[in-house]
Amino acid sequence: MIKPRNLAVLMQRLADLISTARHDPTRHTCFVSYHDADFSEVESFIRQFGEEFVPRCIGVTPQDRFVGSLDEHYIKSRVRDECLGDSTVTIVLLGRETWHQMFVDWEIAASLLEGPDRPRNGILAMPLPSMGNRATLPERIRDNFSGPGDEKSPVIYESYPTTRESFRAKLDRAHASRSQPGAAVNNARPLRRADSP
């Protein structure tokens, strides 16, 4: 079995390969958050839409030094710096078990973290095709999703895209949500400490 860090590295290499096939300076740099159990569907997503954004796919793994810390702000900051990097949008791909995954929660929390010199990431949550455009939302996404069509929502929840153009429009909306006046971010929920529901 491939270990989680190796899976993440494999996904990043694939994403880099696909992304470099196209030069477009208007593309957004995106962090892709997903559960390892959905690796094959996430791989298909990257193959289909990977040219539409600059990918960052290596997320939190048990090998990261900050995983054992009890300081939640430190964890969010480390995930922000070490995993999200220069991304401006976080794409959360939702499978059957994504909603209760500890590291997905940490990645969402880090995405919502706003600093003096760095705004929060826009968040685009989408169910994977196997979910039939329905998915249980992670609690932190629910805390920040105002509803479909709410322009002040810090989280954009959309169906899985059918075309590159529709995907790019969803990404643009998520990116624009970063600077929406009046968008109330709720990142007070304690970080998950286990994957259990």
Image (cartoon, grey):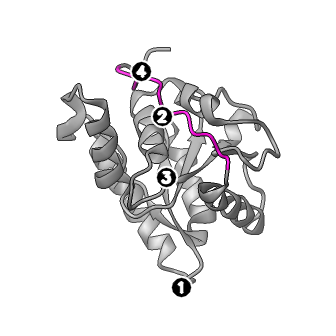
Disc 3 marks which residue? 120
Q: Where 98 falls versus 149 (above or below)?
A: above
| Mark 3: secondary structure | loop
- What residue span does the magenta drawing correspond to? 182-193
Between tags 3 and 1, which lies in front? 3
Q: Main secondary structure of the magenta part?
A: loop
Which residue is at 62% across, 64% downward? 49
- The single residue placed furthest to the right in the displayed view is 149
Mark closest to the chain's N terminus, 3 or 4: 3
Marker count (numbered): 4
Instruction: Please provide percent x and percent y for residue 145.
Output: 68, 36
Q: Is residue 85 left or right of residue 50?
A: left
Residue 166 picture quarter = bottom right
Disc 4 marks which residue? 195
Q: Which mark is residue 23?
A: 1
Name the kind of residue labelled 2 in the image. Answer: Ala
Mark closest to the chain's N terminus, 4 or 2: 2
